[in-house]
Amino acid sequence: MWLRLAALAVFAVVPCAFAQDRSPAPLSLDDALMRVSDTHPTLRLLAGERPALEARAQAAALKPPLTLGVDLENALGSGQTRAFDAAELTVSLSGVLERGGKLDARRALAQANLDALAPRRETARLDLLAEVARRYQAIVAAQREEAIARLDIDQRQRAVQAARARLRAGASPESVLLTAQAQLAQAELDRDRARQADRAARLALAVLWGQREADFADVSGRLDRLPVLESFDALAQLLERTPELAEVAGQARVQEAQLRLARSEGQADLQWQLGVRRLQDADDTALVAGLSLPLGSARRAAPGIRAAQADLAQNALQRDAVLLQLHATLAEAHGRYLTARLEVQRLDDEVLPRLQQAERAAEQAWRAGAISYLEWAQLQGQRVTALRRQLDAAVQAQTALIELQRLTGQPLVAARAPQEPTP
């Protein structure tokens, strides 16, 4: 279930048009989550704890064992007890009658430990899936950075060609050509750096499912898919069902069971014995029976009871502390998401279209000799800077969205943002 939710909430996965014909097929976020969920040792390790806890629960349900005893008295001595002339042989069966509900308390404690495993596994699962989403996002960001660098290379190449033509015509000095070539080289460096970051990010993701090399060439995610979230108050209500609080509640049930077991220790167990004794010298048999009750059990149990009560009281404080931390993290991530989403949309709607038009108009004006090369180059740089700023804001928004999903464990997509235009 959590796997499905994670795939829904983290930047919606759609096929990229430029990757449809590549081989091998692009890796979707669903595929990455499935691979990690099936193979990661952390989840398998937690799942492996269940058989051990079930075995302990079975052991806790066992009653105290019966004891078979054989006693030999008045044998191999001296005088009348020489050899076995006066020997007394007793065969007995003894056991313990548990008082205070110890058996039920042990069962409750074992079951509470077993029940606490599920929220622990869900917490670890959500943390792991969030890490998968972050590493997947890093690949998408690197590929987007490479696309921006290719756009920058394209416009710098046009500038180099135009500068070379004007130099031949004597309309501009050689310094303009050299400047354009240097800026082209910087754009190519940005492209190569983005490619290296892409390779590193793909390897970092593949390592999560145990591979030393990435077996996929591309991913199919989009960073510009920024959903409209519910209000902070609505999201805060979802925190009551988060696995982290369920884990604290599970620990509280364990501590309650420990307190119950500690209180049961205050009532001493009744030990009984029943047997038959044979008197060798009289060649007779007799019944032997006995009862014993330890004294001072309540006094010895008192420290354990106080310790269990203190642990249980601490659990309530721990829940308040965890809930407060969850609300603080939720508020920070929610605000960061709204701010970054606003920046992405405003850049897409108002800034980038105008910069694109201005850059094209500046190119025409420079070719006509109406403006200097510096003005055209500045507009080219501003457009690339705005695209990278938009990318940074989208990454921040997606990072906050991943954190929101990890906190709530719920799909948060309420609507889809408009698609990012291809630069």
Image (cartoon, grey):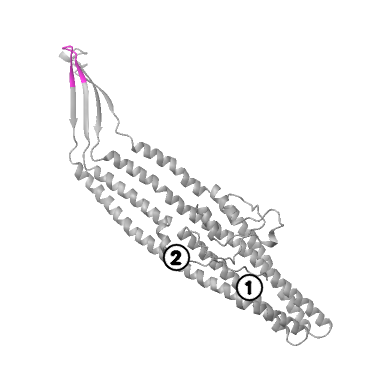
Q: Choose between 421 and 364: the one closer to the eye.
A: 421
* Res 330 label: 2
Q: Is residue 37 left or right of residue 96?
A: right
Instruction: Give, as a single range, the part of the protein colored magenta.
Output: 276-287
Q: Earlier in the sequence, mark 2 or mark 1?
A: 2
243 shown above or below 372? above
Q: Residue at x 40, y 63 (%)?
A: 325
**Going by the picture, which residue comes out furthest to the front?**
415
Q: Position of residue 78 (x, y in %)?
A: 17, 15
**Residue 297's spot in the image, x, y percent?**
20, 41
Q: Is residue 93 left or right of residue 343?
A: left
Above or below, 201 against 257 in this view is: below
- Frontmost residue, 299 versus 49: 49
The residue identified by callout 1 is 387
Secondary structure of the residue carrying numbered label 1: helix
Is residue 146 one of those drawn in magenta?
Answer: no
What is the magenta segment's predominant secondary structure? strand
Q: Residue 32: which quarter of the image? A: bottom right
